[in-house]
Amino acid sequence: MDQRFTLRFTATKEGQLLREALGEWRISKRALTAIKFEGGLLTVNGVERNVRHPLQIGDIVEVKFPPEEKSEGLVVEYGSLRIVYEDEAILVIDKPAHQSTIPSREHPTKSIANDVCGYFEHQDLASTVHVVTRLDRDTSGLLCIAKHAHIHHLTGLAQRGGEISREYEAIVHGHVVVDKQSIIAPIGRKDTSIIEREVREDGQFAHTDVTVLKRFNIRGEPMTHIRLKLHTGRTHQIRVHMAYLGHPLVGDELYGGNRAHINRQALHCVSLQMYHPLTAGSLKFSSPLMADMERLLNW
């Protein structure tokens, strides 16, 4: 059985070169190179053709992408995954806290990517892991995986176009005074750390919307339950912006929080909205807070 990821299109322009049509169908030049040299195939009405072939209206074009190999060093594992949605193009997962999205030097195994590799293997899917929306190790909630490099290319275009929307809920130290506000402050790597980020003039543009949901106290310590919408996706963006505002996330020791009440940063991706990369249909997913954050809210 041919396991290659395959897409079919119908030509709509008389005499258009196959190369030009593939560009309009958002097949990247990189993908065309892989198709040509790494075991892919282009056919028109079932006959193999090259990109200089002129099309006629109604021609059926089939694009077979070459099989993918998993990233070197990515160990195949078979842990459990909380799958929220799956089809031939994407996989949406509800990630627990204390699990990395991808392996790192400190945590080379037991990541979401390791488990997805094992899941794809069970499906006989000739693909590797393409992370669309990544979460920090201690952040829980929704993340999206593309099941093929071409789908990753399409979702990358969607992200750059602002067509993928994520919202989070967090618990921060102190009472946030303003009910609704936007934090627009550039973020860059801190000079003294390879991990930590900070707001700095030469950083990358970053925009976060913050809405207060509830102000409360735990044993006299003020805290605020907030909802956040990301307009950009900088590393540690929410954590950096809230620390910059003077309200670090509860449990976020890297940016000034403490772990007296929870053993990770209190941050959860509650909503993911996007258009399907192949059908353009609207997709919306939601995830309830994990028990450790609910416990703080119901103290």
Image (cartoon, grey):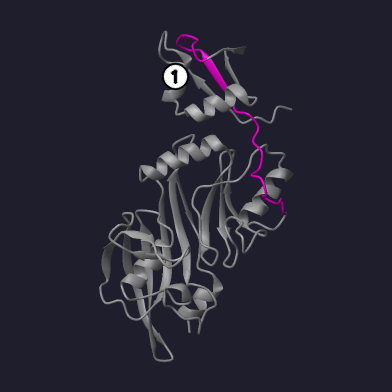
Residue identifier under label 1: 21
Q: Left or right: 244 with respect to 129?
A: left
Identify which residue is drawn at 48% across, 64% down. 195
Which residue is situated farthest in the front direction here? 192
Residue 72 lies in magenta, yes or no? Answer: yes
Is residue 283 visible to us here?
yes
As drawn, 58 above or below 40: above
Q: Please say whether residue 32 is one of the residues in the magenta stretch.
A: no
- Foreground of the two, 276 or 239: 239
Residue 128 location, x and y as percent? 63, 42
Q: How many marks?
A: 1
Could you tell me residue 144's position as x and y percent?
52, 50
Quarter holding the N terminus? top right
The answer to whether residue 130 is left or right of residue 179 is: right
Front-lying residue, 263 or 84: 263
Q: Secondary structure at mark 1?
A: helix
Circle 1: residue type: Ala
Coordinates of residue 280 in the picture (x, y in percent): 44, 36
Q: Between residue 80 and residue 236, name the one nearer to us.
A: 236
Give the quadrant of residue 146: top right
Q: Is residue 276 visible?
A: no
Q: Position of residue 288 (x, y in %)?
A: 50, 65
Q: Is residue 172 above or below residue 52?
A: below
The majority secondary structure of the magenta stretch comes to loop
Residue drawn 45% across the image and 53% down it: 272
Q: Residue at x 35, y 66 (%)?
A: 241
Q: Residue furthest bottom?
A: 220
| 199, 114: nearer the viewer | 199
What's drawn in magenta, residue-wise? 51-77
Characterize the local packing of mark 1: few (<14), some (14-19) or many (20 or more) Cα atoms within 10 angstroms: many
